[in-house]
Amino acid sequence: MPEVNAFQKIKSLKENLGRVIRGKPGIIDLAITALLSRGHLLIEDVPGVGKTTLAHGLAKSINCSFQRIQFTSDLLPSDVIGVTVYNQALHAFEFREGPLFANIVLADEINRATPKTQSALLEAMNDRQVSVDRNTYRLPRPFMLLATQNPLEFSGTYPLPESQLDRFTMCIKIGYPDESHEREIITRSASASSSVEGLSPVLTTDEVERMQALVEKVKVDEDLVGYIMAIANSTRNHRSIRLGVSPRATMTLYKAAQARALVSGRDYCIPDDIKALSVPVFAHRIIPVEHGVDEGTEASTAVVEEIVSGIAVPV
């Protein structure tokens, strides 16, 4: 059984984020799930719904380093990773770390950077390290990349390649708040206690790493592994899908289900963990046969939902 303190810490983290992300407990749970599964999060939505606030709030809730990188077409890989420079005082070359060297990194409007700059993130996302001039540098732990993009604006953007999308644990949409919560957001916008700056850390980096280790101990029955495989195989053989999910995706869903169980206060997975995560984990990874550039992940979401609804849930 995981430490009771872990559940209390997760509850405190939810409450802290709930102060700045109003009326979206499901979105908060998904963000925490991605963090505890050692994953990365892609937030795809229209401007002004709280994408950046979610990233800032998560970073402020943890006593950790945070960097925001505004991605633009003229951004270079060295602007993100860092660069080797000659130190005249020491008569030697030294590496100057870029903004990627932080525990939580916000890649704002990631699709505005060129493919060359986007590819600079691949090693960091996969191996938690970067390579520069034949030297390898480890990134801080824990490390999480949160990226945002607007799915409706394509002027001056570069769509993320499948290899990059496959490294994001989840792709989520925040959506508009309901009327009551939007009223609350408007009336409390001037209050310091309801802003990101008013948040205090409720977790340390060591505590986050301990909870990430606890996630790996969450029990997953063999029937649930079969459930994951059934969903994955259906994406690979579905008539409406040109590219199904990869083995990396099935491993990601497995880890995310373990993390969701811990976030829900359990030390074991249930079918609902897999069912609830199938769309955010799988939808951005598949390519439908007929897919327009202006559809975003809507077509993929509909197909994954159809697949999940047609597969028997293990009991």
Image (tube, grey):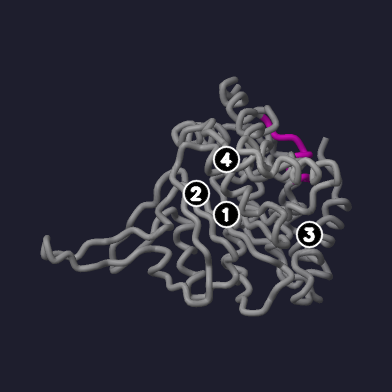
Q: Earlier in the sequence, mark 3 or mark 1?
A: 1
User: Does residue 257 lie above or below 290 as drawn?
Assistant: above
Placement of the N terminus among the 4 image quadrants? top right
Is residue 142 left or right of 147 when viewed as pictured? left
Answer yes or no: do the residues labelled 2 and 4 have beta carbons within 8 Å? no
Q: Earlier in the sequence, mark 3 or mark 2?
A: 2
Q: Earlier in the sequence, mark 2 or mark 1?
A: 2
Secondary structure of residue under mark 3: helix
Percent x, y of residue 92: 14, 64
Residue occupied by mark 3 = 234
User: For the magenta stretch, what is the residue range?
Assistant: 268-276
Residue occupied by mark 4 = 36
Amino acid carrying label 1: it is Leu
**Numbered circle sitting on residue 146:** 1
Amino acid carrying label 3: it is Ser
Placement of the C terminus among the 4 image quadrants? top right
Percent x, y of residue 283: 73, 60
Magenta-span inclusion, residue 19: no
